[in-house]
Image (cartoon, grey):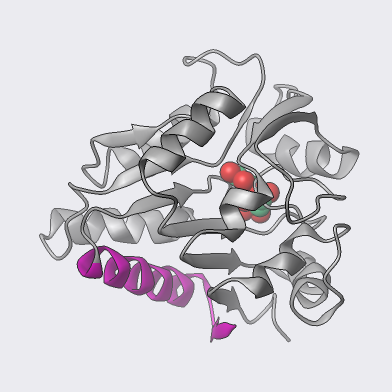
Amino acid sequence: VTLKIQPDAEGLAQTAADFISAQVREKPDLSILVATGNTPMPAYAELARRVQAGEVDFSRATAVQLDEYLGVTDDDPRSLWDWMRRSFVKPLGITRTVRLKSPAQFEAAVAELSGLDLAILGLGPNGHLGFNEPPSPPDASTRTLELTPASLESNAAYWGELAVPTGAITAGMDLILAARQTLLLVTGAHKRDILHAALDGPETPEVPASFLRRTALTVIADGAAWT
Ligand code: F6R
């Protein structure tokens, strides 16, 4: 595990953008599993700035959707597909995407890409990765599931008055853990205990993120999450 602690959100955005840019320079046609959520947004904005400035080029990369709610349409403000397109795909000039519609379609599409080169992940307050809710063993496959109360609560922060859909689909633990590089971004004091559980506690399905230690993992956290 490579751990990079940053003093603040700005440092985290720069460091994450450096890491992701280095990956795309090394392999311009890389496939990237893309988390939404709040944590990676400053890093995506910094990447967009660098693309605008001609410092890095994502035009040959493929963006792969990590998770989605069930039953939301494309024009629903809660669509995670739309969030990924707005925050990552369009601003980075990416034209190739894999959408998560059904487990069979998704697994075939990822196999066609020869797997995932980079998984950009946030850390759920309950240790989830994507919507791999606890308990999720390392071989949990791409599937639909019901969100746990903890995730419904944390996701409520995204949508204001709108209810959080209770059903979801997620890329499986199996595909995430097979990514050639994994990048976990973590900010805030409320993530401190779960981050320590993921990195220092036992590997357990109760903390799905604990299995990331089996991968080529880079963790970038702010000082509040890592003290
Ligand atoms: C979002 C996702 C989730 C979030 C996690 C952390 O696509 O897959 O697993 O990464 O819930 O969310 P934030 O970053 O909002 O704290």
Q: Residue 20 lies in what quarter of the image? A: bottom left
Percent coordinates x, y for residue 58 in the rendering: 22, 52
The residue lying at 67 percent from left, 74 percent from top is 213
Left-right relation of 23 to 60: right
Task: Decide whether the magenta segment is chiefly helix, strand or loop.
Answer: helix
Percent coordinates x, y for residue 216 in the rendering: 53, 74
Left-right relation of 105 to 212: left
Quadrant where the N terminus is found in the figure? bottom right
Residue 190, compared with residue 132, is above or below; it is: below
Front-lying residue, 128 or 212: 212
Quadrant where the C terminus is found in the figure? bottom right
- Is residue 25 on the magenta stretch? yes
The residue lying at 65 percent from left, 44 percent from top is 172
Residues in magenta, as a range:
1-26
Percent coordinates x, y for residue 43 in the rendering: 41, 61
The residue lying at 28 percent from left, 72 percent from top is 22
Residue 67, compared with residue 5, is above or below; it is: above
- Is residue 142 on the magenta stretch? no
Residue 78 showing in the rendered view? no
Front-lying residue, 145 or 106: 106
The residue lying at 51 percent from left, 31 percent from top is 106
Percent coordinates x, y for residue 44 in the rendering: 38, 55
Q: Residue 68 lies in what quarter of the image? A: top right
Left-right relation of 71 to 210: left
